[in-house]
Amino acid sequence: MIRQVVYLSTARNPGSDADLTAILDTARAKNGDKGITGLLAHGGTLFLQILEGTPEAIDALMAKISADTRHRSLRVLQDIMVDERSFCGTTMAARTLDPDAAHLIAARLRNGMLPATTIAAVLGDAAEAAFGAQVLKAA
């Protein structure tokens, strides 16, 4: 079984594209070694991340993320065990996050579980509507 966590947080500072690239590069390098895969969506000051891996690896990473002072208001939206990974082709996929999509996902998760592939599709639909193109970037 694979543990899958979805969280939403707010950055203390908006950051630049270079900052986001550095975060993704670090995540891809370190998470791959720990068997963690997932998706990071960012827009304005909002981050929505889906993490998947062994329960021990996710516990350790969530402790580190929770202590990171670059963001605040971290809310775990979903924490479940799944039979298989949703992001097995990449250590950390990335998407643009539309704030409306983040709020829609959070609202849907208050009413029950939502598969990671559905969350990714909602992000893709919002990004395509906002930017007119697919914004998925694989590792």
Image: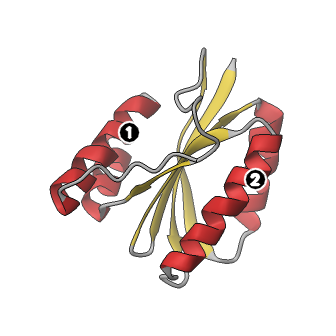
- Secondary element at tag 1: helix
Label annotation for residue 55: none
Whether residue 113 sits left or right of residue 124 in the image: it is right
What x and y, as percent, mark residue 33? 82, 42
- Please say whether residue 44 is visible from this viewpoint: yes
Whether residue 96 sits left or right of residue 79 in the image: it is left
Count residues near mark 2 (Cα–Cα under 10 Å), then give few for <14, some for 14-19, many for 20+. few
Q: Quadrant of residue 24?
A: bottom right
- Please say whether residue 111 is visible from this viewpoint: no
Instruction: Identify the residue shown where x is 51% and y is 45%.
Output: 138
Instruction: Identify the residue shown where x is 55% and y is 33%.
Output: 87
Q: Residue 83, relative to residue 125: is it above or below?
A: above
Residue type, mark 1 in image: Ile
Residue type, mark 2 in image: Ala
**Residue linked to disc 2:** 29
Count residues near mark 1 (Cα–Cα under 10 Å), then give few for <14, some for 14-19, many for 20+. many
Q: Earlier in the sequence, mark 1 or mark 2?
A: 2
Instruction: Identify the residue shown where x is 68% and y is 51%.
Output: 28
